[in-house]
């Protein structure tokens, strides 16, 4: 199967495939590993005598992350950072609601994002480009959705690092001079956007 578009294409019978060269594989893997480091390790294995119900209802943090990238990955469920929220609802009430929601959902959300990033790393580790050429990555089963989640998280993280808050701001990024230190990150951000869009189209 030959694929040279650099974007995802539909597989016969379902799923998606993309041809990636060694540099593309290296960049994607590096970003996914950094994502895993940012999210942090999973919960330790529970002791043999641990109460499974207690683990099921274990509470997470109630305060939003201080790191802007993590705050983008794990936003408040109610209200907004600028202090505006639902009309007629006190901001303190919205903050309390967000804290309560975060306590019971963030651990699961972190676990899901960790699994998505791990899926990217494991998929890429299975590729072996021949003689400096491209290797074809085929995603079937749950992997397309894992990749979709992982690519979205990578873009959110880079957007936070680049201080991008609106989609239309990304257009200005094309005009950065080559010697701008943000240029490599910008190119990665735009490339990931293309990958994400093409994967969505295949699904």
Image: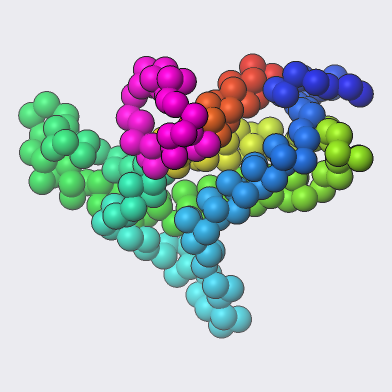
Tell me what residue is drawn at x 39 percent, y 49 percent.
70
Does residue 88 show up?
Answer: yes
Judge left or right: residue 33 versus residue 79: right
- The image shows residue 14 at horizontal and vertical percentages of 79, 24
Judge left or right: residue 115 versus residue 185: right
Judge left or right: residue 115 versus residue 172: right
Does residue 119 show up?
Answer: no
Residue 99 position (above or below residue 147): below
- The image shows residue 162 at horizontal and vertical percentages of 38, 37
**Exactly how many numbered labels are in the figure?**
0
Q: Does the magenta stretch include residue 168?
A: yes
- The image shows residue 130 at horizontal and vertical percentages of 91, 40
The colour style of the image is rainbow
Tell me what residue is drawn at x 48 percent, y 67 percent.
55
Q: Which residue lies furthest to the front in this view?
A: 179
Q: Is residue 44 magenta?
A: no
Tell me what residue is drawn at x 64 percent, y 37 percent.
147
**Quadrant in which residue 203 is drawn:** top right
- Tell me which segment is drawn in magenta: 160-185
- The image shows residue 51 at horizontal and vertical percentages of 50, 75
**Quadrant in which residue 195 is drawn:** top right
Between 139 and 68, the residue placed more toward the observer is: 68
């Amino acid at each position: 199967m030959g694929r040279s578009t650099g974007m995802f294409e539909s597989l016969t019978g379902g799923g998606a495939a993309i041809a990636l060269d060694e540099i593309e594989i290296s960049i994607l893997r590096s970003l996914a590993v950094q994502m895993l480091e940012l999210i942090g390790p999973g919960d330790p294995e529970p002791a043999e005598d641990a109460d499974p119900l207690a683990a099921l209802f274990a509470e997470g943090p109630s305060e939003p992350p201080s790191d802007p990238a993590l705050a983008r990955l794990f936003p408040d469920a109610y209200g907004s950072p600028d202090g505006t929220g639902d009309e007629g609802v006190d901001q303190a009430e919205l903050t309390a609601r967000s804290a309560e929601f975060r306590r019971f959902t963030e651990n699961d959300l972190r676990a899901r994002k960790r699994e998505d990033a791990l899926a990217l790393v494991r998929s890429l580790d299975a590729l072996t480009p021949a003689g400096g050429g491209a290797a074809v990555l085929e995603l079937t089963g749950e992997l397309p959705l894992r990749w979709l989640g992982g690519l979205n998280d990578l873009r959110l993280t880079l957007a936070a690092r680049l201080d991008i808050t609106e989609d239309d701001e990304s257009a200005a990024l094309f005009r950065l001079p080559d010697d701008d230190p943000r240029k490599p990150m910008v190119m990665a951000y735009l490339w990931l956007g293309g990958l994400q869009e093409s994967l969505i189209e295949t699904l």
